[in-house]
Amino acid sequence: MLNFMEASTSAAKVFLNWQTYGAFAEFLAISLIPMLIFWAMYRTEGNFGEKQLAFSSMVMSLMKTLAIYVFMLTLSPVILGVSDSANWLAPWVLVNEIPIFAAQSFGILMLFSIFAFFIPMLAEMSTFRFLIMGTIALGASLALNDPANPQAAIFGQHLVPDVWFCVFIIALTFVLNLVGCMFSWKMTTMLKLDGSVGGLMLMYAIAAIVGFIPVLIYGAWIGAHM
């Protein structure tokens, strides 16, 4: 319990860093601009065929996964507590220095994002998807500590918390999912955005905010044990 509370306090400090909001704005841009583009195309053409729908869904899934990857890599120094500054070049450094590892880790994220929709709990609870995908991306950021041996840089760390920490993280994720759904519904209803692209974007942004909170707590725990 003490470890969880300490990690939660450290995670809360991430929200006091202005670079967190810069990285989140970047996350939203990567995630939502494709949605706006396809929405504009849909409005112009009036309808999408099966191939167009499949292509747009694939691109939006790809970009949402990329957004999580870039966000976690960029903000990892702040999340882990090793620096007060985000590493804005981290995604490009990872791709340039260890491209095979970057492709493998991003591929794992993509595969999970696809298979998650076939698992009822993950399909219905976006916060759990953000928790798992954010954790994978955060783990990938540890490879920057030793680009010559990325696997050792990751698995050489203490990555598995005690049982109670895991229980609290899972419970918090479940509660945040409920709170996020209720808040999203209330906001979209109040702003009269039900069923609109603006409502979908707002719901996604809220889901991301509450979904990243458990990842920040876990990241703070890893940082304290590095």
Image: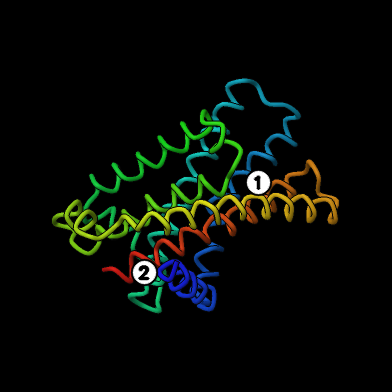
Q: Position of residue 46 (x, y in %)?
A: 76, 29
Residue 182 screen position, x and y as percent: 74, 52
Above or below, 56 relative to 26: above
Residue 139 circle label: none
Q: Is residue 118 in view?
A: yes
The image quarter containing residue 29 is: bottom right
Residue type, mark 1 in image: Leu
Mark toward the viewer: 1 or 2: 2
Circle 2 — which element?
A: loop
Q: Residue at 62% of width from left, 20% of height from top?
A: 50
Q: Quadrant of the C terminus?
A: bottom left
For this rendering, which residue is in front, 156 or 67? 156
For the point 56% across and 49% down, which residue is it?
127
Quarter of image, res 84 = bottom left
Task: Determine the residue positioned at 54% across, 53% down.
Answer: 171
Q: Looking at the image, which residue sits at the far top?
A: 50
Is 73 or 162 nearer to us in this picture?
Answer: 162
Badge 1 marks a residue whose secondary structure is helix
Kindly identify which residue carries mark 2. Answer: 80
The N terminus: image quadrant: bottom left
User: Which image quarter: residue 15?
Assistant: bottom right
Q: Which residue is mark 1?
A: 36
The numbered mark, 1 or 2, whose residue comes first in the sequence reads 1
**Could you classify mark 2 by the number of other residues whose Cα lies within 10 Å: few (under 14), some (14-19), or many (20 or more)?**
many
> Does 177 sit above or below residue 222?
above
